[in-house]
Amino acid sequence: MQETPFCLRVGKLLPYCMSEYNTTDFTNPSTFILQGIPGLEVAHVWISIPFCAMCFIAILGNFSILFTVKMEPSLHEPMYYFLCMLAVTDLVMYTSTLPKMLAIFWFNSRGIDFRACLTQMFFIHCILVMESGILVAMALDRYVVICHPLRHSTILTNPLVAKIGLAVVLRGCIVVLPFPFLARQWPYCRTNIIPHPYFLHIAMVNLACTDTRVSSYYGLFVQFCLMGLDGIFIGVSYTQILRAIFILPTKDARLKTLGTCGSHLFVILAFYIPGIIISLISRFAQNVPLYFHVLIANMYLLMPSMLNPIIYGVRTKQIRDRLLRLFTHKGA
């Protein structure tokens, strides 16, 4: 049986053929098998080392961001509240994916209960949608700071920031909820083996032996309409920001003002650019081994959560100074 190539990332095509894994002697299995990195099983322990390093950096960095913002009164501003939301989502992303990945790499524990599959799928997709919404909220904050600096404190008040944060969370949960709800109703009779170390919606679509067009179309809607609109909103915001920057009288003023957006711009690039790269690879590198596609997809899923605290820690003077004072004080 020959299957259509799919990718385990929302809206991103990643070719892999399931024919070599097909088994058709069961119906609706209660347990699925995650392959990890197919073709590199003997190197799973070594592959786990960079993943553990990424996890350590992500946890340390994001907790440092949360602690610094909490302890530094000068950081009690909308931008840093949104940054804390981003740090929390990054931590949830790692806790949703990495424990099972390490269990596969270290103990060859590949089985995963069907309900656990649905739970993991829900959290991963929800975090992706929430991160996109948080980046939009950060773009709004940068727009108000630069284009309406005198009204920033009156426009983005703490109650409004709380409402925006709640809206981002609710949007992520509500938009993603149909994925596990639909997947739970489908019959599965093709295979229970997935050549990846985590479960996403498109994997369930590929395994189901029923008409899944509604779910596929809805997944495309989430990717291209909802998250695409987020990208358009960010682009419009930065168009207005750049217009405001270029009318400033001096070069130093322009560079200083642009520097206030630097961290956010790098985080946006870390979130969107890898997706574009993996999409191009999946379309124009069909002959690349499956394990390469899987490794790239894993890095795409986990790398931004590690980079975000590094970007803000290095480029944000207030966070950097607070951390330096903390370590200097402890050292003294």
Image (cartoon, rainbow, N blue to C red):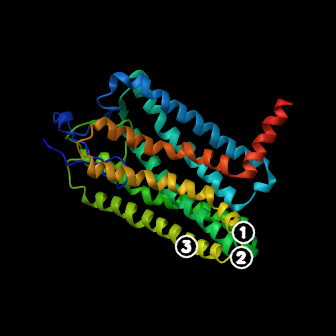
Where 61 sits versus 125, above or below? above
Q: Secondary structure at mark 2?
A: loop
Pointer 1: residues within 10 angstroms few (<14), some, or many (20+)? Answer: few
- Residue marked by disc 2: 249
What whole-number distance in Å separates the C-alpha atoms at marks 3 and 2? 18 Å
Distance CA(mark 1)–CA(mark 2): 7 Å
Question: What is the quadrant of the C terminus in the image?
Answer: top right
Residue depth check, mark 1 versus mark 3: number of the one nearer the observer: 1
Q: Nearer the viewer, residue 30 or 325?
A: 325
Residue at image position (34%, 21%) is 42
Query: Is 229 on the left-hand or right-hand side of 239?
Result: left
Q: Which residue is mark 3?
A: 239
Q: CA distance from mark 1 to mark 3?
A: 18 Å
Q: Secondary structure at mark 3?
A: helix
Work out which residue is located at the far front of the displayed protein and give it.
Answer: 251
| Residue of label 1 | 253
Amino acid tagged 1: Ala
Q: Residues within 10 Å of mark 2 (few under 14, many from 20)?
A: few
For the N terminus, give its image quadrant: top left
Residue 56, horizontal then vertical, whole percent: 58, 33
In the image: residue 21, left or right of residue 226? left
Q: Earlier in the sequence, mark 1 or mark 3?
A: 3
Residue 65 is at least partly visible in this image = yes
Residue at horizontal 20 percent and vertical 51 percent from the top = 210
Pick whichever of labels 3 and 2 is earlier in the sequence.
3
State how many labels appear. 3
Disc 1, disc 2: CB below 8 Å?
yes
* Residue at point 72%, 66% (across, down): 252
Residue 77: give x, y in percent of width and height: 73, 60
Amino acid carrying label 3: it is Thr
Q: Nearer the viewer, residue 67 or 125?
A: 67
Q: Residue furthest right?
A: 332
